[in-house]
Image (spheres, rainbow, N blue to C red):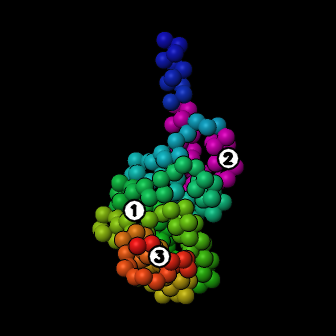
Amino acid sequence: MADQENHDDAIQQIDVQNKSLLHAARTDDLELLQEIVSSGAFDANHSDGVGRNALHYAASSQSTQVLPEILNLEIDVDHQDRTNADTPLHAAVNVEIPDGEAGKEVEEIRNWIVNELLEAGADPTMPNKDGDLPADLLSYGTKSRSQLGQDLLARLKRGQAEININASDIANDDDVADDGEGSEGTPSEE
């Protein structure tokens, strides 16, 4: 009986920590996040009722303090939510941009977050349930009209191209029949 109570308490503690993880991501609370990580009693990939994980919330809330820490956890950077099948990359791109100087700051943060997600391995070729890639969401409306928007669109397109290149697209010295030198300046083997 005591073992069952201890087990139930442990599960309840993890549940509280998981909800706190999402809260820390949403509110950019680095201190809370560090406490959760120190406890070790949490699931980095925990998602809420609509399927959003800590990265979704950090990206959509522009939580710049906690984002690097969350990316250091073993978290699925391409987790799709249940509502729209949006990834954290979709959430980052889809942030609302206000007019004026405030908009420029939001765009700069958005671009930084997208770059961090891409550097962490986020896949810019994953569509949501409507078939939209993150770059598609950016190109709707006015989000890509500014220079920062254009820069981000170019970065996403470059990320798509990098993912679409695979081993069969790369020329190999063995693929070309010649009697010249290989790419390293040494005679090619026949």
Among the two numbered marks 3 and 1 on one chain, the one whose residue lies closer to the N terminus: 1
Among the two numbered marks 3 and 2 on one chain, the one whose residue lies closer to the N terminus: 2
Residue sitting at x 48%, y 87%: 145
Q: Mark 2 points at which residue?
A: 34
Amino acid type of the residue tagged 2 in the rendering? Gln
Mark 2 to mark 1 CA distance (whole Å):
27 Å
Residue 110 appears in the picture as rendered: yes
Among the two numbered marks 2 and 1 on one chain, the one whose residue lies closer to the N terminus: 2
Q: What element carries label 1?
A: loop
Residue sitting at x 60%, y 59%: 67
Can you give x and y, in whole percent of width and height, for residue 26 in the image?
56, 56
Up-down relation of residue 55 to residue 124 (above or below): above
Q: Is mark 3 on a helix, strand or loop?
A: loop
> Quadrant of the rendered structure where residue 90 is?
bottom left
Q: Mark 3 points at which residue?
A: 188
Q: Name the residue under label 1.
A: 86
Q: Which stretch did the figure color magenta?
A: 12-38
